[in-house]
């Protein structure tokens, strides 16, 4: 307790250029300050661990309005996606661009967010259909006015309804969308639907964080995500057997004139900063929400892809994110007949 008080405490403070996140914790009565109760799942494969309504409510109530900023900005993320697609021959330079959407190869972006993957693909010559459960993010995509790019609000597993009978050459599900599905059975079902829908030798690109191996403990569970002079975004991870509950905390600054930073949603009161000699200081408002994410193990995801019929062309990890490129393999590849239902959520794949 003394070290906690004399050292750095869990607080946020403002400098002239940015917000700084400092953390510490202490114990009370020899018990951890933050307690995590284990969650036992009678059937981890089929139980609906992540409630779609909770994910949608979290995005619409807090995250969606700040999503592009939280992720580091549009320009940087589109550049990352473009580089990835070029590295794997998904887009080429020079790019052949057809004016007629009917003659362009179809790409489907599952969990399209604000369009970090959709926009580069459309500009590179694909006809792109983005699907997301967040109306706010879909409106952001449509407001960009990118040719040959449409976006719809729906369940990811319903994407075939928007393909107009065409077989996609490419399906992407990136940006950690996969763990937001309701259950591991839904992940397996998505792989099956995608395999069936893809054109021969079509590809599926995934990126997701592996939450299935190990768990952060103590103050390591508090993660600074993004900050500027008007906003501070952090999250706290609470680990259970089958999922991680992600608690997002957003502080927004309100100026003395009463104007607050853009996109502020429902909030709770937070202490106001003290006045300075230069005049009244800004006050800070806390906005908070949480949602669950599946604990997916990379090896189990790869096994499920192969059991579905996919061939794994690429797997890599960068800054905690796993990237996978899988190809629809023909029946003679020998990947059929594998056991299905191999996904496990407890961190160690069999």
Image: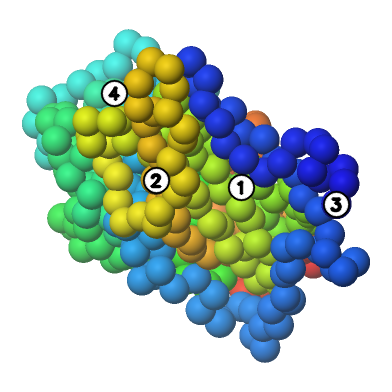
Of badges 3 and 1, nearer the viewer stands 3
Mark 4, other Cα within 10 Å: few <14 / some 14–19 / many ≥20: many
Q: Which color scheme does this rendered protein use?
A: rainbow
Residue at coordinates 21% horizontally, 63% vertically from top-left?
161
Residue at coordinates 36% horizontally, 55% vertically from top-left?
267
Residue 124 is labelled as 4
Judging from the image, what secondary structure is the residue with disc 2 in? strand
Mark 3, other Cα within 10 Å: few <14 / some 14–19 / many ≥20: few
Above or below: residue 16 compared with residue 342: above
Q: Specify which label sits upstream in the sequence, 3 or 2.
A: 3
Above or below: residue 31 compared with residue 14: below
List the single residue furthest toward the left.
100
Horizontal and vertical percent position of residue 59? 35, 55
Horizontal and vertical percent position of residue 177? 46, 52
Residue 209 is labelled as 1
Residue linked to disc 3 = 1
Of badges 1 and 4, nearer the viewer stands 1
Q: Nearer the viewer, residue 301 or 329?
A: 301
Query: Residues under labels 1 and 4: Cα distance?
Result: 27 Å
Query: Residues under labels 2 and 1: Cα distance?
Result: 30 Å
Using residue 191 as the reference point, say whether residue 67 is left or right of it: left
Q: Specify which label sits upstream in the sequence, 3 or 1.
A: 3
Q: Nearer the viewer, residue 284 or 313?
A: 284
Residue linked to disc 2 = 285
Q: Nearer the viewer, residue 215 or 94?
A: 215
Residue at coordinates 23% horizontally, 36% vertically from top-left?
258
């Amino acid at each position: 307790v003394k070290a906690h008080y004399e050292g750095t405490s869990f607080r946020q403070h403002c400098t002239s250029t940015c917000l700084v996140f400092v953390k510490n914790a202490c114990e009370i009565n020899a018990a951890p300050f933050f307690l995590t109760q284990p969650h036992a799942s009678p059937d981890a494969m089929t139980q609906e661990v992540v409630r779609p309504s909770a994910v949608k409510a979290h995005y619409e109530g807090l995250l969606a309005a700040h999503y592009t900023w939280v992720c580091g900005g549009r320009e940087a993320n589109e550049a990352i996606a473009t580089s990835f697609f070029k590295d794997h021959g998904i887009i080429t330079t020079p790019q052949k661009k057809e004016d007629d959407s009917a003659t362009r190869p179809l790409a489907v972006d599952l969990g399209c967010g604000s369009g970090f993957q959709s926009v580069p693909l459309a500009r590179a010559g694909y006809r792109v259909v983005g699907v997301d459960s967040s109306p706010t993010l879909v409106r952001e995509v449509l407001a960009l006015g990118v040719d040959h790019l449409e976006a719809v609000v729906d369940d990811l597993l319903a994407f075939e309804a928007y393909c107009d009978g065409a077989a996609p050459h490419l399906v992407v599900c990136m940006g950690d969308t996969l763990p937001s599905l309701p259950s591991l059975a839904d992940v397996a079902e998505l792989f099956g639907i995608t395999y069936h829908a893809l054109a021969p030798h079509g590809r599926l690109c995934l990126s997701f964080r592996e939450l299935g191996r190990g768990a952060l403990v103590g103050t390591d569970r508090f993660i600074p995500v993004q900050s500027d002079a008007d906003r501070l975004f952090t999250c706290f991870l609470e680990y259970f057997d089958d999922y991680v509950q992600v608690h997002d905390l957003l502080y927004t600054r309100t100026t003395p004139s009463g104007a607050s930073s853009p996109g502020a949603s429902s909030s709770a009161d937070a202490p106001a900063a003290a006045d300075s000699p230069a005049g009244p200081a800004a006050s800070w408002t806390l906005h908070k929400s949480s949602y669950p994410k599946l604990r997916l193990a990379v090896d189990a995801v790869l096994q499920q892809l192969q059991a579905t019929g996919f061939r794994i062309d690429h797997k890599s990890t960068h800054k905690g994110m796993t990237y996978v490129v899988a190809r629809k393999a023909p029946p003679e590849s020998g990947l059929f007949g594998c056991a299905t239902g191999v996904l496990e959520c407890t961190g160690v794949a069999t």
